[in-house]
Image (tube, grey):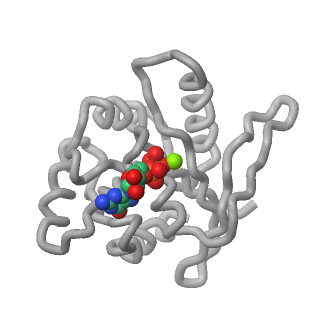
């Protein structure tokens, strides 16, 4: 199996948009097999001669157990468990939120290496400063990116493949 890159974050930060940038091809939905939690979308990715799979996950919400939110958490954990590296996507225009802090402390308890992608940083003038707000999450260097415009994704992928 190709190495897995898991995309994690709260709702609406731009995870799926970023996945569309980082991966080619179409969603390949792998459904649960009996006894195996595997109901996530996998997309093939390719960078500098390295092949991998990108797994999109639903938006993580920890303080609410209604509807399918516990299921999304279970899926995100399953994605992390099989991942070589996780990309924690945050919203640079919103700045760090309590929900981001909660996800960060959950991610620090996992054994997978985590990179922070600060999305919505399409402004070349502001991107660096928006990203710098996220050092406080305690997960290392935040990388400014824009899933919509594509900037920063090459630098992000350079570090991602170093973890594969
Ligand atoms: P997800 O819920 O984390 O998967 O987020 P989506 O990919 O569905 O995007 C949520 C919203 O953020 C949508 O309205 C997107 O158009 C917007 N969005 C995603 N990426 C960017 C970006 O790079 N810049 C800006 N300004 N908006 C973005
Ligand atoms: Mg999404």
Vertical placement of 160 versus 109: above or below?
A: below
Side of 102 relative to 60 (left or right): left
Q: Which residue sits furthest right?
A: 34
The quadrant of the image that shows the C terminus is bottom right
Vertical placement of 92 versus 26: above or below?
A: above
In-front residue for pair 16/143: 16
Side of 71 relative to 36 (left or right): left
Picture quadrant where residue 10 is located: top left
Is residue 161 something one can see in this rendering?
yes
Q: Quadrant of ligand 1?
A: bottom left
Residue located at (62% from left, 72% from top): 24
Residue 106: x %, y % from top left: 41, 31
Vertical placement of 47 versus 60: above or below?
A: below
Is residue 114 something one can see in this rendering?
no
Residue 158: x %, y % from top left: 42, 74
The quadrant of the image that shows the N terminus is bottom right
Residue 77: x %, y % from top left: 57, 35
Residue located at (55% from left, 30% from top): 73
Picture quadrant where residue 154 is located: bottom left
Residue 17: x %, y % from top left: 47, 59
Residue located at (85% from left, 37% from top): 33
Residue located at (24% from left, 36% from top): 97
Side of 147 relative to 133 (left or right): right
Q: Which residue sits furthest bottom?
A: 49
Count of numbered badges drawn on the protein: 0
Side of 19 relative to 1 (left or right): left
Q: Which residue sits furthest top?
A: 65
């Amino acid at each position: 199996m190709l190495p897995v890159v898991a995309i994690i974050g709260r709702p609406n930060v731009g995870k799926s948009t970023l996945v569309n940038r980082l991966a080619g091809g179409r969603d390949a939905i792998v459904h649960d097999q009996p006894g195996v939690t595997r109901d996530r979308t996998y997309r093939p990715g390719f960078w500098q001669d390295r092949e991998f799979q990108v797994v999109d996950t639903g938006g993580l919400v920890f303080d609410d157990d209604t509807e399918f939110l516990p299921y999304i958490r279970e899926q995100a954990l399953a994605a992390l468990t099989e991942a070589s590296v996780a990309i924690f996507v945050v919203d640079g225009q919103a700045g760090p939120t309590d929900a981001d802090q909660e996800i960060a402390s959950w991610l620090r308890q996992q054994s997978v290496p985590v990179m922070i992608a600060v999305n919505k940083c399409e402004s070349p003038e502001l991107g660096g400063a928006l990203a710098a707000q996220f050092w406080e999450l305690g997960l290392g260097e935040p990388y400014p990116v824009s899933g919509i415009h594509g900037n920063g994704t090459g630098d992000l992928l350079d570090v991602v493949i170093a973890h594969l």
